[in-house]
Amino acid sequence: MALHPTLVRVPGTGELSLAPPGTPEPPDATTALPALWAGLGLSTEDGVTIRRAVEKSGTTHWQQLTPARYIYTSQELTVASVFQETRGVVLGAYFGGMVFSETATGSKKYRAEISAVPRGDERALCVDWVDQISATQVYNHRLYIPRVEVSETADSQWTRTQEARWGLTFAALSPASGTTLAVWLTNDPAVLLAVPAATALTADTADTDAPKEKTP
């Protein structure tokens, strides 16, 4: 058993950011995101919830009870968080692409319309988090998803005893080309920890290693 306590990571702080769909992948996990990206600001102390769900069904047979193989039926990757800043990018995502504009130049009065017809609001998403263990051990992680759409919104309750909160779940969409659903960028050496390969006993090896029956 090989235990590595120094590889435990705590996402001490981070932020989610949105950009227009098709925005290129950032070069690494530490470079500041370009102006195309808009941060969603403060979120509750629960942080971010990443969920990956893969569904598959096994083949059924007359001759045996166990499946001979599995057929994959769906895959879902979601990113969820509850945001505490009532800023335009957050409200726009919550209300399906709603955009505020000034009612008259210089009026400092703004208006947005919530559409009666739901429509797609595709974005690119980055999830950034940092674990600062010491002055010399600062590890950055960045999850980049080129295509996402809000799949679920949580109820937003407005009261005098709590800030307005906006719960959003973003679901990854299939890539425009290729097979890459998301990209994980990091400067953390922990991800390169060598894992011993399992020794597989093949049928040929089993035949070779098995005792040979002597010919009378």
Image (tube, helix red, strand yellow):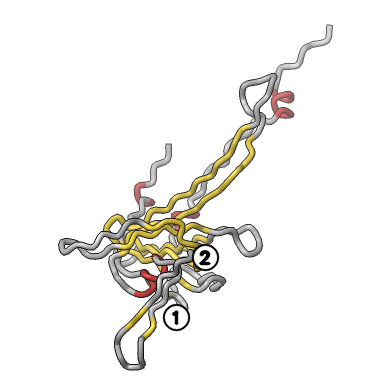
Left or right of 68 in this view: 152: left
Q: Is residue 109 above or below residue 99?
A: below
- Residue 164 lies in what quarter of the image? bottom left
Query: Between marks 1 and 2, how big is the CA–CA gap?
Result: 23 Å
- On the image, numbered disc 1 is attached to which residue? 35
Tell me the element at label 1: loop
- Quadrant in which the N terminus appears: top left
Please indicate, yes or no, whether residue 166 appears anywhere in the rendered image: yes
Instruction: Looking at the picture, tell me which residue is in the foreground, 195 or 15.
Output: 15
- Quadrant in which the C terminus appears: top right
- Observer-side mark, 1 or 2, equals 2
Report the residue at 44% width, 54% height from top: 190
Report the residue at 57% width, 37% height from top: 198
Please indicate, yes or no, whether residue 27 appears anywhere in the rendered image: no
Instruction: Looking at the picture, tell me which residue is in the foreground, 60 or 52.
Output: 60
Residue 19 spot, x, y in % from top left: 47, 73
> Three-letter amino acid code at disc 2?
Gly
Tell me the element at label 2: loop
Which mark identifies residue 120?
2
Left or right of 57 in this view: 94: left
Residue 138 spot, x, y in % from top left: 35, 64
Point out the residue furthest to the top here: 216
Report the residue at 30% width, 67% height from top: 42
> Three-letter amino acid code at disc 1?
Ala
Q: Residues within 10 Å of mark 2 (few under 14, many from 20)?
A: few
Q: Residues within 10 Å of mark 1 (few under 14, many from 20)?
A: few
Instruction: Looking at the picture, tell me which residue is in the foreground, 81 or 4.
Output: 81
Left or right of 200 in this view: 120: left
Point out the residue furthest to the bottom here: 106
